[in-house]
């Protein structure tokens, strides 16, 4: 079951302003990826910041698949001095998407957790990989302090996420059942965030930012404090 729909994402991205893509986070992990890859696909990647990053800084032949895409991707290419169509786009439902093409890198960020059948979503990611290909998946961790903030201050956003998909033990179980044994780990300095669309007072936002600054100094990577979960796997050639 999909926990969101096209209208959810149309509204979510309505105020998106394309800008120069330089740092999209996870840069130390991106160093583990090859300098060149002939084919790269991002699942659920609109408006395309990661896709632009991987083309600009890694030189990848990038395809972006999402079931909601609008002209923002064109503006993002232009602002980042990319020729129109540099980022190939496929507007399609991931569940009905069929591809004979296999990719050297299959990437998604903040996608898996919007569906209830986590195992099926992971299987579909793996199915797109070429022999020797790399799976790179990130998702937010809402099973700790940040999830509590979302639940209390932005319930609609919290409800759009499947928190069981953020269970590392369950993810590992599913991957092993699919015949894979990826690295799965918590990532990032502790932090809190409140989405711009959340209806909270400026005082609450300021308090959340202050608390985020304080906890960011804690050198911990665990379920309670870490903001992200990463799945990383390299298939045998």
Image (tube, rainbow, N blue to C red):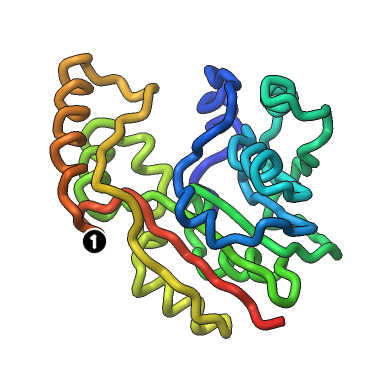
111 relative to 32, above or below: above
Quadrant of the rendering where the N terminus is positioned: bottom right
Residue 210: x and y in percent read 16, 28
Find disc 1 in the rendering and name its residue.
Answer: 222
Task: Quadrant for residue 74, please give it.
Answer: top right
Identify the residue shown where x is 78% and y is 43%.
90
Q: Residues within 10 Å of mark 1 (few under 14, many from 20)?
A: some
Residue 196: x and y in percent read 38, 23
Residue 18: x and y in percent read 60, 21
Question: Is 218 in front, or is 120?
Answer: 218
Identify the residue shown where x is 16% and y is 43%.
215
Is 157 left, or right, of 106 in this rendering?
left
Task: Quadrant for residue 159, please give it.
Answer: top left
Is 192 left, or right, of 215 in this rendering?
right
Return the residue found at the far right: 100
Quadrant of the rendering where the C terminus is positioned: bottom right
């Amino acid at each position: 079951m999909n926990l969101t729909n096209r209208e959810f994402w149309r509204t979510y991205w309505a105020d998106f302003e394309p800008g120069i893509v330089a740092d999209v986070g996870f840069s130390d992990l991106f160093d583990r990826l090859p300098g060149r890859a002939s084919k790269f696909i991002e699942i659920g990647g609109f408006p395309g910041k990661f896709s632009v990053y991987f083309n600009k800084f890694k030189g990848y032949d990038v395809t972006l698949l999402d079931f909601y895409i609008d002209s923002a991707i064109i503006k993002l290419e232009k602002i980042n001095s990319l020729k129109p169509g540099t980022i190939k786009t496929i507007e399609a439902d991931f569940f009905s998407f069929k591809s004979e093409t296999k990719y050297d890198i299959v990437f998604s960020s903040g996608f898996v957790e919007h569906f209830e059948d986590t195992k099926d979503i992971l299987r579909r990611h793996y199915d797109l990989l070429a022999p020797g290909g790399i799976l790179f998946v990130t998702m937010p961790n809402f099973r700790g302090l940040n999830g509590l903030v979302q639940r209390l201050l932005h319930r609609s956003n919290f409800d759009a996420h499947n928190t069981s998909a953020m269970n590392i033990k369950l993810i590992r179980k599913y991957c092993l059942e699919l015949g894979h044994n990826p690295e799965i780990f918590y990532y990032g300095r502790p932090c809190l965030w409140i989405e711009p669309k959340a209806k909270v007072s400026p005082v609450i936002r300021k308090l959340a930012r202050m608390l985020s600054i304080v906890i960011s100094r804690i050198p911990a990577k665990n379920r309670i404090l870490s903001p992200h979960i990463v799945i990383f796997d390299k298939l045998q050639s």
